[in-house]
Image: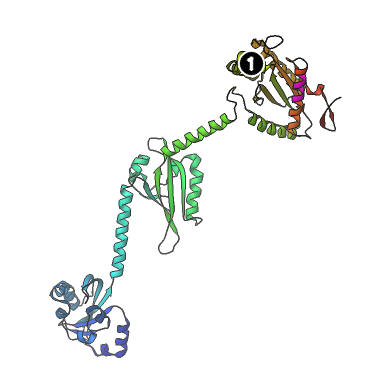
Amino acid sequence: MPHHLDNSVVTTITDAIPGLIAYWDRDLCCRFANKAHAAWFGQSPEAIVGQSMRSLLGDRRVAFNEPYIREALAGKAQNFQSELTRADGTIGHTWINYIPHFDENGEVRGFFVLVNDVTPLREAERRVQESEARYRLLAENGTDMVFELDLGLVRRYVSPACREILGYEPDELLGVTPKDQIHPEDEERVARTFQGLLNGSSSQDSIVNRIRHRDGRWVWVEATLRTLRSATSGLPSGIIGSLRDISARKAVELELEEANRRLEALAGLDGLTGLANRRTFDEVLEREYRRARRDRRTLSVIMIDVDHFKAFNDHYGHPEGDHCLRLVSEAIRTSIRRPGDMATRYGGEEFAVILPNTSESAAADIADQIREAVLQLALPHEGAPGRRLTVSCGVAAADNFDGEPAVLIKHADRSLYRAKEDGRNSVVRASKLLTVVAGKFSATA
């Protein structure tokens, strides 16, 4: 052993190093060992010094090391991985370096041995490999399509489930972005979601969108997405996600939405006549009243009542009474022709018509057309004076909107009752009964 290896400073330094350090001469006799050997082999450095490599490691291990030893004694540094048994019988994974030691004449006198315990690293690698194997197993056999995108949103991995979901082989989807397959209506939303994951706004997200199948049809999919980050910088390096086909679920959702729309439409209709119901009338009147006030247009309302309807029901029975109301509603429906006009069943045998942008005079003409259309039905009515079914109509218009919609209905109702008092089968205009005082309706004496 060279004299400088006995230096107390060198010994102090090498004993502080966690790795095993030793020096072996050409006869494979240990001339120096640091304290780390005590923990590994269960012997003090002093007990190891003077031992042969065979006595310390055993025949099998020495035979394993012989090729490396020969190279080291030939002046060539060696490094290799090896399993090394500890004193307690456990096996450690080590990285071993043989460093030749030359004398002043360039002759190899022995070699230094540096042993680093890499067992924790190997265990970590094993766990990573097992985790990757499990992930790969799930990705390769799962029904969801697993994919990885880089910072340019180019696919770097696609699992085989893409065959079932999109009709493509994995290799066909690699190296390209999904942009061209996204439905145009969904493209902007998907781009915002991807951008949020890459700029740090979010670390995970999900999105439902349509993507084109190989056969040209659109497939509804749900994607769950996470940001991938660099192990060194911690910055986003891409996106990993899983994609599942939800076309069947989406079809059910769309059917339910359509059913709800139909229910909402039905909820606004009268079940007997098919006209709008009272609730719809109130909503539309409120809306049209505000619009007429804003646009300074006239809004008119016709209130209609079937004359002597109780007597009709009592004489002919309720089924015939219902049939009568259906015929009257159809007569009203066919008498109004503009898309913005709306006929409703106001309640019982009473009907109402909303006429936006219509003067009282024009509304009275429409009311008279309704009265005549019902008369032309020629429905027998033994309880009526003329023995035919008739209706009475009251008409009111608003062109000064200091009041509320209820005021307009009030005056149309008064006109209707005046029509009934005057013998029925007639149309009465509110302006014949009312005068306008300070912008509001009031009854004349």
Please give the name of the residue rendered at 29% of the width and 59% of the height, measured from the top-left corner: 130
Please give the name of the residue rendered at 27% of the width and 89% of the height, measured from the top-left corner: 4
**Rendering quarter of residue 245:** top left
270 and 245: which is toward the camera:
270
- Residue 202 % position (x, y): 49, 55
Q: Is residue 166 above or below residue 332?
A: below
Q: Magenta segment, which residues?
A: 413-419
Please give the name of the residue rendered at 66% of the width and 18% of the height, measured from the top-left corner: 310
284 and 212: which is toward the camera:
284
Q: Is residue 153 above or below residue 118?
A: above
- Residue 369 % position (x, y): 70, 15
- Residue 401 % position (x, y): 77, 33
Determine the main secondary structure of the stretch shown in magenta. helix
**Rendering quarter of residue 346:** top right
Is residue 264 part of the magenta span, yes or no?
A: no
Horizontally, residue 309 falls left or right of residue 252, namely right
301 and 338: which is toward the camera:
301
Residue 143 visible to an observer of this rendering: yes
> Which part of the image, by quadrant, shows the N terminus?
bottom left
Count of numbered badges drawn on the protein: 1
**Rendering quarter of residue 358:** top right
Q: Is residue 203 above or below residue 402?
A: below
- Residue 379 % position (x, y): 64, 11
> Which part of the image, by quadrant, shows the C terminus?
top right
Q: Is residue 245 above or below residue 49?
A: above
Residue 396 visible to an observer of this rendering: no
Residue at the spot of label 1: 314
28 and 389: which is toward the camera:
389
Horizontally, residue 252 falls left or right of residue 263, namely left
Q: Amino acid at mark 1?
A: Asp
